[in-house]
Amino acid sequence: NAGVTQTPKFQVLKTGQSMTLQCAQDMNHNSMYWYRQDPGMGLRLIYYSASEGTTDKGEVPNGYNVSRLNKREFSLRLESAAPSQTSVYFCASSELGGLYYEQYFGPGTRLTVT
Amino acid sequence: AQSVTQLGSHVSVSEGALVLLRCNYSSSVPPYLFWYVQYPNQGLQLLLKYTTGATLVKGINGFEAEFKKSETSFHLTKPSAHMSDAAEYFCAVSDPLYSSASKIIFGSGTRLSIRP
């Protein structure tokens, strides 16, 4: 049981390049999330998927797109990377939606855009 | 709207001393509250959560937190700090507006350092 896995662990992009961050969970969770973490700002929600086949914007969706490929996988795409997207990106999942369920986090992807 | 304030971005205590990390929240409805811990170069891990019932909540690694509605606080404590407790700690509150998903609002974090 690996929990939540993310690839890659590290990535350096040039401004304007594109890339996709991959996330997978093996806990049969329904809901999945993408966050970015910046110093002094905690975690901010980019997009989430309450269930397979649905996605919704979070607090900071501009510059990103997501795909809920199936129940296990939720990818985050940067179409044209900008230096402001330099951050650590975390994927998370929860058993169901709603207030009660805690989230389980992956180890993160450290992205630098030059 | 929900919000979370963590007082002190950095707290340093001696090994064996009391750990107290402060968290205040604002919420228009009874909140669900969480504390997460992040060890260096790792993702966040749930320490404990308050949903309903007993206001003193015990978590992993000897941590506990008390929900005080009158003070809108959910401070995290541990009687005796260990070197292994050095990490960043995040307080969080569920946002009831996002009923379709477990949308959680995180505080900005408190980095805990332990002095030998």
Image (cartoon, rainbow, N blue to C red):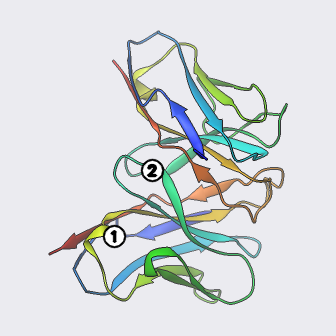
Query: In the drawing, does residue B1 fall left or right of residue B58?
Result: right
Element type where label 2 sits in the image = loop
Query: In the drawing, does residue A7 fall left or right of residue A13?
Result: right
Looking at the rendered image, the disc whose residue lies closer to the viewer, 1 or 2, is 1
Label 2, residues with CA under 10 Å away: few <14, some 14-19, many ≥20: few
Cβ–Cβ under 8 Å for marks 1 and 2: no
Q: Residue at x 69, y 31 (%)?
A: A73
Check the image and report above or below for A9 versus B63.
Answer: above
Query: In the drawing, does residue B71 fall left or right of residue B115?
Result: right
Task: Give the letter of the chain under mark 1.
Answer: B
Q: Quadrant of the C terminus of chain B?
A: bottom left
Check the image and report above or below for B60 versus A54.
Answer: below
Disc 1: which residue: B85
Q: Residue at x 38, y 56 (%)?
A: B39
Check the image and report above or below for A48 versus B97.
Answer: above
Task: Give the letter of the chain under mark 2.
Answer: A
Q: Gap in Å between the C-alphas at discs 1 and 2? A: 22 Å
Disc 2: which residue: A41
Q: Quadrant of the N terminus of chain B?
A: bottom right
The residue type indicated by label 2 comes to Met
Q: Residue at x 17, y 73 (%)?
A: B115
Label 1, residues with CA under 10 Å away: few <14, some 14-19, many ≥20: some
The residue type indicated by label 1 comes to Asp
Query: x, y (%) of residue A17?
Result: 47, 9
Query: x, y (%) of residue A78?
Result: 56, 19
Residue B22 vs residue B79, the one in the foreground: B79
Query: x, y (%) of residue B59?
Result: 54, 77
Q: Quadrant of residue A23?
A: top right
Give the total number of marks visible in the rendering.
2
Element type where label 1 sits in the image = helix
Query: x, y (%) of residue B20?
Result: 38, 81
